[in-house]
Amino acid sequence: MAVAVVQRLAKGSAGAVASLSLAPGDGWATPTAGNILIVFGNSDSTITMTTSGFTAGPSVIDGNGAYSWYKTAAGTESTITITPGGSARTTISAIEISGAALPIDASNSSTIAGSNGVVTTAASVTTTAAGDFIAAAALLHSYSVSSPSSPSWTNSFTQQLASSSTPVAGSVDVTTFVAELIAGAAGSYSTVCSWTTNAGDRQHIILAFKEAAGGTAFTRTVDDPAGLTDSTSAVSTFARTVTDAAGFTDAAAAVSAFARTQTDVSGLTDSVTAASVFTRAPTDSIGLTDAVAVASGPTRTVDDSVGLTDSLALARSATVNDGAGLTDGLALARSATVNDSAGLTDSVSVELAAAGTRQVDDTIGLTDSLSVSSTQTLTDSLGMVDAVTLAMSAARAATDALGITDAVSVDRAATVADSAGLTDSVSVSLNSGGSHVVTITDSIGLTSAFRIAQTTYRPSSGVTARPYAGVTPRYPLVPD
Amino acid sequence: MPALTGQVITTITDASGEPVVTVTWFYNPANSNLRNNPASWTAPSGTVYPAGTGALIGDNRLGRMVRMRINDAGGNQIRRVNLPAGGRSVTANQLANAAPPDGPYTTVQSLNGLTFDLS
């Protein structure tokens, strides 16, 4: 974006003034917000910039006060005012440029004090980029015959503004010349101003401003750290990460290939679907996962450390960790592990058939209903197991270490252990051949009622070999 | 009402407008001869230079040495003064005894054309 001059204006005071302004009445237009304003002030006194927001550039103070300022326009600078330290002859020069940006690229000054002459000395700036806008000012003071005039500049600088205090009254007058250059390549630039009529104090200030950055080329990044991402899609090939740190992700889909991670640290994930292949890990550390479906293939882990998992549907080889939340519904096939360390598991169904190792642990919470088939271990170490049904096959163990097991219904070859709680009802019902062993152990608590159907009952140590009052065995008990 | 009488102050600022290099020199307005500061002078950085500290005082907050050049009207360097990080003060006597080609400095005109090499 090339730098361009929007407006420039200069003004000299008529006699000594307490302040000096460029205003609409002088032809100064309110600048466009974002443009750069450059101001030079020159006075028979020190000067203060009265208009707010300006940054001070180089200054030289001896017989005269020579100053520079600049700022990014707010779009409200309809008047620019400088104030001498006392009523004094003064000039003000201002330039508005577009296409430039702060910070300033370079600046410098030079000074000649108390020595009549018609030229400044050079002060150089070293620019760091091509296309800088360079403004140079000769800020002159102390002459007697007439105001300096006919300025010219070396090194292709173009004279643009001239202003003098009037009428000429002697050594108290000031004159300012301003020249401009659009620089070429980065490098060192300098100029010297010369004029007619001697001046005793000859200050020189030079300022360089860089072009504003353009809007093309590489490296696009879309960050939405706290907002809403309505749709995010990473379509193909390797290594995608979809991250929405604090917002809402309405739909996140990682479609294919390797190594996907879907993470929603603090927000809500309404739907997460990891469709196929290897190593997926949907993680919802604090938020809510309304539905998680992990369809097939090995090794899935679903972690919902603090939130709620309303529905989980897992196929094989799955691990579900619900560290502190609630798992309202779980449907698991084989080789599943459900860990609900502190929450509630309202319903856990480990349904299917053949082979392999299911384990449901509810270490502190409540398991309201558990239904399992073969080779299962159900452990409710501190909570309550309201209903346990061990339906089929061999070698089952239902353990309720400290809680209460309200109803236990067991088929063959089962072990029901209620080490410290109460087992209100134990029903060992079916038996095809009468040869299986059912062991009911209630080491400290009470077994209010139990029914044993078509089986051999071998009371273990600490268990009453006969039913309590009110309980009638359907088949005779067989002494051990 | 000149802005200053018997003293020149030139200041370079950083991008935020803070003075980073301030150089001042003192002279007798009656004869233009350099002289040590007749009164205490406080730099923009807050450093106080008591009366008599020097005729040329440089306050340098850039954190590195700054070369000051004295150019002729054609922009050619005719003298140079190095301003170390932190700053430096030089008395009128030291300036008067500075050896050529960078000295001596005896009057305010000796320092005319002073600018900075900030590259």
Image (cartoon, coloured by chain):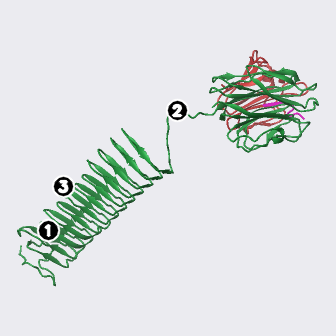
Chain colours: A green, B red
Question: For residue A411, which numbered disc appears in the image?
Answer: 1
Q: Where does residue A145 sit, x and y in percent of width and height?
A: 94, 24
Q: Quadrant of the C terminus of chain A?
A: bottom left
**In the image, is residue B5 part of the stretch drawn in magenta?**
yes
Question: For residue A356, which numbered disc appears in the image?
Answer: 3
Whether residue A180 is visible to the viewer of this picture, yes or no, is yes
> Label 1: how many residues lie within 10 Å, few (<14), some (14-19) or many (20+)?
many
Asked if both marks, 3 and 1, belong to the same chain, the answer given is yes
The relative height of residue A249 versus residue A382 in the rendered view (above or below) is above
Q: Where does residue A321 sit, x and y in percent of width and height?
A: 32, 56
Which one is earlier in the sequence, the residue at label 2 or at label 3? 2
In this view, which residue lies farthest toward the bottom?
A: A470
Residues shaded magenta: B1-9
| Quadrant hosting residue A393 | bottom left
Q: Amino acid at mark 1?
A: Asp
Question: For residue A217, which numbered disc appears in the image?
Answer: 2
Cα distance in 3D space between marks 3 and 1: 19 Å
> Label 2: how many residues lie within 10 Å, few (<14), some (14-19) or many (20+)?
few
Q: At numbered mark 3, what does the secondary structure look like: helix, strand or loop?
A: loop
| Quadrant hosting residue A6 | top right
- Which secondary structure dominates the residues rendered in magenta? loop
Q: Amino acid at mark 3?
A: Gly
Q: Amino acid at mark 2?
A: Ala
